[in-house]
Amino acid sequence: MTVHTTYFGGLAGLDVETDAVLAVVRRPHDFIDDVTDRNVAALAPPESLLTAYKRVEDAAETDGEPLPAKIAWESVSFEARYRRRLQNYAGANRALSKLRNRLRDGETLTLACWEKNPQWCHRRVLADVLVEPLGDVAVEHHPEPFVPEPEPRDTSLTTFGGDEA
């Protein structure tokens, strides 16, 4: 029993045995039906959380911040808010219960969404919440979560209008 996570672009190269590939997105595109078994929208983050995250991420990118996804994730308390959603939303509870039963029956599941890096992606949190009460189910992320090294900024005193040495 394993829960794999990946992004849609990574599905083609994913070499794992799985019983079902489940999209977990709020806004599915038509092609998702071709690359997954179904979309479980009840497990997607709420629209208000996605909007807040994207707004902060866009502002951080505009400001030239090196890790805009990290800034957005932390600024909107994404993980805590998403965990609360999974705990308190009846639709999410029903979906989690059904998926846990499949895992108890020995199935292997793959969760897929848009973000390549699971470090700041709801599917990483979802996989953890899904397996927490089960204890003996492995979680494998494809790719593994990573924190990219920020690009060094080329700055000097002259950049700030000063030319004294």
Image: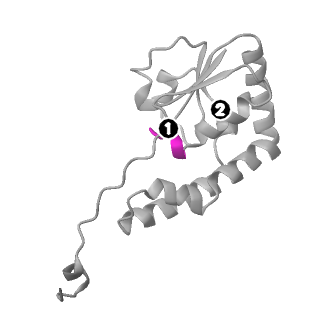
Q: Which of the two residues, 74 or 152, is positioned nearer the viewer here?
A: 152
**Which picture quadrant has residue 53?**
bottom right
Give me the residue at 45% from left, 31% from top.
143
Q: Which of the two residues, 151 or 89, is positioned nearer the viewer here?
A: 151
Question: Can you name the residue that lies furthest to the front here?
Answer: 165
* Alpha carbon separation for disc pair 2 and 1: 13 Å
Query: For the residue carrying disc 2, how many other residues have a C-alpha within 10 Å: few (<14), some (14-19), or many (20+)?
Result: many
Q: Which of the two residues, 22 or 30, is positioned nearer the viewer here?
A: 22
Q: Element under label 2?
A: helix
Magenta span: 115-120
Residue 117 counted in the magenta span: yes
Counting residues from the N terminus, which is met first, the one under dot 2 or under dot 1?
2
Query: For the residue carrying disc 1, how many other residues have a C-alpha within 10 Å: few (<14), some (14-19), or many (20+)?
Result: some
Left or right of 51 in this view: 94: right
Answer yes or no: do the residues labelled 2 and 1 have beta carbons within 8 Å? no
Quadrant for the C terminus, please. Answer: bottom left
| Whether residue 137 is situated above or below residue 144 in the rendered picture | above
Give me the residue at 18% from left, 89% from top.
164
The residue tagged 1 is 145
The residue tagged 2 is 127
Q: Element under label 1?
A: loop
Residue 19 counted in the magenta span: no
x and y percent of residue 124 in the render?
59, 37
Q: Can residue 51 be seen?
A: no
